[in-house]
Amino acid sequence: MTSNNDILFTRAQLTTPGGVNSPVRAFRSVGGTPRFITRAEGPYFWDADERRYIDYIGSWGPAIVGHAHPAVVKAVQDAAARGLSFGAPTEGEVLIAEEICKLVPSIEQVRLVSSGTEATMSALRLARGATGRDKIVKFEGCYHGHADSLLVKAGSGLLTFGNPTSSGVPADFVKHTLVLDYNNVAQLEEAFNNMGDEIACVIVEPVAGNMNLIRATPEFLQAMRRLCTKHGAVLIFDEVMSGFRVALGGAQALYQVTPDITALGKVIGGGLPVAAFGGRADLMQHMAPLGGVYQAGTLSGNPVAVAAGMTTLKLIQEADFYQHLSAQTLKLTQGLTNVAAQAGVAFCADAIGGMFGLYFSEKVPTTFAEMMATDKEQFNVFFHAMLDAGVYLAPSAFEAGFVSAQHNDEVIAATLAAAHGAFAKLA
Ligand SMILES: *Cc1c(COP(=O)(O)O)cnc(C)c1O
């Protein structure tokens, strides 16, 4: 019997490049046919063949309260009935801005945008506008969306400027981007010693979630804070993924390190397109219409999207939300580690809040190089065995996974039962 997923994928490739609207969805890394999703509820979604999966990507983070949460759906329906978009301010935008400032104290003022890419791109422009400097520092393996100056990998030598990772990005656009190693304090110090007075900002994922999951060391984030302050550079935490995922106040609450600017996205839209950047009021005052840094958006602060985001932000503040989320995520990662050990497979896992990493290696990676050295072939076999058993993991060895508040004990147990068979294939 031909799968409806195959039929749709064949058709999709005729009118959409690669058949998808975001590359990772194409399953290129793991092989096989992407599943076309028809509906989702709680911890599950269903594909075009009516097969049910336990979902561990949660739309890559946003679905933290579970899919199609009744309160979120109701808020969206109510907002939609009042009109979809006005191009003029609304009370909802005031309320969500107040909520974000309350939950993330380093954010005194915030601007809403529609994607994480827009948020980081605008944060960089703000940092450059406020400091009058051009150079930016980023770290290999961190993803900050697809703005030109951020699609960069390390150059040939340390402290040389980067090379574009995408064709279509002029080398001239990335010549101001310095790419350093994640968790390498000495290198960061050297960069600031060499050119500290030229650096507009450092941008970092304070818990990296785009090279699988890698924790920053506290020393790394503290050094960054100290060096930015000393040299007058802006510290940008890209918490598009970690914000409201690793803890209610984001990674900055966990590490107790205060950035100047924070980028948010994913969870704050609750599944609809909302992202934001915000921080110290004196910096945010550089934004138009107050200051000279231009940024705008037709659908920024869209009332329907804001309704989904606001309702999600309320739900995650319920008592014990994060204790429960973290506990469920730990049951998953510890369970998988046990099953792998029984099967004799070299495997380990890490979890922070509702975010987790699975690694086919002896120990949890702490650097980009260690992550790249994990066993991708083993992951791919494991991924397909789990998929066949009804568990949908991120379709790449180098992506993090996400648990929602609806992943109850029964769902975790079903996942571990599937993992017994999957690890047995690798033994
Ligand atoms: C997802 C992500 C982005 C980009 O957000 P989009 O909404 O996909 O543009 C930026 N930074 C981080 C850390 C992300 O995880």
Image (cartoon, grey):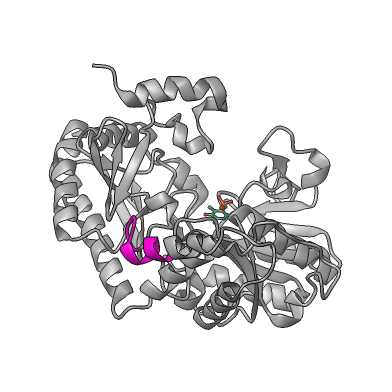
Asked if residue 400 can be seen in this view, the reply is no
Magenta-colored stretch includes residue 339: no
Q: Is residue 307 above or below residue 399?
A: below
Left or right of 319? Residue 110 is right
Q: Is residue 283 above or below residue 402?
A: below
In percent of width and height, residue 280 lies at 68, 80
In percent of width and height, residue 413 lies at 14, 53
In which quadrant is the N terminus drawn? top left
Left or right of 219? Residue 376 is left
Q: Residue at x 42, y 31 (%)?
A: 27
In percent of width and height, residue 346 lies at 26, 43
Q: How many marks?
A: 0
In percent of width and height, residue 139 lies at 61, 54
Q: Residue at x 58, y 60 (%)?
A: 184
Q: Nearer the viewer, residue 183 or 2?
A: 2
Left or right of 167? Residue 210 is left
In which quadrant is the C terminus drawn? top left
Q: Nearer the viewer, residue 23 or 318?
A: 318
Identify the magenta region. Answer: 65-75
Q: Nearer the viewer, residue 304 or 413?
A: 304
Asked if residue 411 can be seen in this view, the reply is yes
